[in-house]
Image (spheres, grey):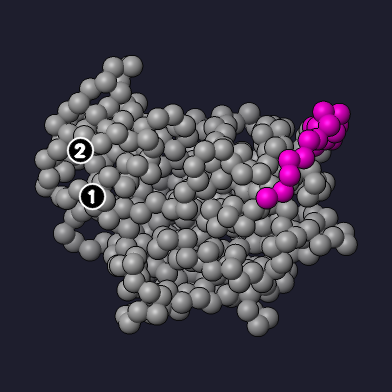
Amino acid sequence: MNSKVYIPISFLLISSLLISACTQNSRSHLSEDITPLDIETHITFLASDSLNGREAGSADEAIAANYIADHFRDFGLEPAGDNGTYFQEFTINTTVLNNPHASQDAEGEKRLSKNVAGLLQGSANSDEVIIIGAHYDHLGLGEFGSLYRGDEQKIHNGADDNASGTAGVLELAQYFSENRPKKDILFLAFSGEEMGLLGSAYYVDNPTVDLENALAMINMDMIGRMTDEKLMIFGMGTADDWENIVNVANTDSLNLNLVKDGTGASDHTSFYYKEIPVLHYFTDTHADYHRPSDDTEYINTEGEALALQHLVRVIQYLDDTTPEQLAFKEAPGEQRQSMSLDGPTLGVLPDYGYEGEGMKITGVTKGRAAEQAGVKGGDIIIGLAGEKLEDIYGYMGMLNKLKKGQKTTITILRDGKEITMDLEL
């Protein structure tokens, strides 16, 4: 772990003034280059029924990968995959997905999946690289990870999760290819994220660009459902100056929710564990998460454009930042690698920005177990089946111990009052 680096206040003030002037001059240019129409075009293709939900290791995933690689080529990015291509292949063992205790060498179906990697050479002679990534796979017909409980098999198009983030990678690749930075930028589109961050985990163990030179990794996952100009950014605790950087870049006065966690259920986690400062952009979950209803018609392309314009200004700031000024630090609190859910679900929408005890929710799905028990949006779930819950990870772990149809209890905190209710899963 790198030692803490203290940055003089004078440097921060001067940097803030410089980037403010820069962003004011480029703001109209930015809005012309990153447009809702382009975002919609990418998402419409990636989340179309013809791609059958882009399940990792499928022929439809390969079509999506080729779409990304073709755009990287059109933008003038250099191939940064294996053997002079844009692709980095890795194997998925579905036996392990169904049994986490199984060996990777276990017999069973093995699929070939691929990350897509393109490198934009900076204009200066610098070894430093900024990494921008998002996963492009989704759930296919819902065999792995779906929250849909209907009897009929349906396509999970994953417009927000994560065609929106993939569109972000493509838009930023195009923007910076036309407005070349001094530092190199590595653009990565991961597969296998929905099966447990498989693509990004493989990449950090088999990097095609030396991660010792990585200044930062910025991840986008579900950035297409912005409401009230709210944008969540995780990773604030992974470098001392992140908060200053993202606030100075906020010239559009977005309602930023800044979260210290360096890990979570997306691909920035893999880079955090390699001691690289990370940011994770997210516009929050919704009732269509991991369901067939996550479709393009619900995407807020204007909101996504605002999020991407903010991210451009962050990257412009990083382009003038040294590794000493953005030294990695461990985020406070317990960091978890991923969340998995094998048990029943309650039909609640977590508030991922909540940092207190228990799991705060923003809403409930009508007719599901939580709503029928009397749980409401704004409640904090602090207990399940008589067990105290510390956080969302404890909630997921407890659900994995329960069975569908089981009768138990749920304890919530509402307006400072503790309430225990009967719950049928």
Q: Nearer the viewer, residue 40 or 208?
A: 208
Q: Residues within 10 Å of mark 1 (few under 14, many from 20)?
A: few
Name the residue rendered at 68%, 81% in the picture. 84
Q: Nearer the viewer, residue 50 or 406?
A: 406
The answer to whether the residues at label 2 and label 1 have Cβ atoms under 8 Å apart is: yes
The disc at residue 291 is none
Name the residue rendered at 27%, 20% in the picture. 418
Across and down, in percent, residue 274 comes to 62, 57
- The three-letter amino acid code for the residue at tag 2 is Ala
Relative to 335, 94 lies left or right: left
Q: Residues within 10 Å of mark 2 (few under 14, many from 20)?
A: some
Name the residue rendered at 40%, 63% in the picture. 195
In magenta segment, residue 287: no
The disc at residue 385 is 2
Across and down, in percent, residue 144 comes to 32, 63
Alpha-carbon span between mark 2 and mark 1: 10 Å
Q: Which residue is mark 1?
A: 401
The quadrant in which residue 236 appears is: top right
Name the residue rendered at 54%, 68% in the picture. 202
Label 1, secondary structure: give it: loop
The quadrant in which residue 417 appears is: top left
Q: Which span of residues is magenta-colored? A: 1-19
Q: Nearer the viewer, residue 91 or 246?
A: 91
Q: Quadrant of the C terminus?
A: top left
Across and down, in percent, residue 166 comes to 54, 58
In magenta segment, residue 2: yes
Vertical comparison of 51 with 173: above or below = below
Relative to 273, 227 lies left or right: left
Across and down, in percent, residue 402 comes to 20, 48
Vertical comparison of 41 with 345: above or below = below
- The three-letter amino acid code for the residue at tag 1 is Lys
- Residue 266 visible (yes or no): yes
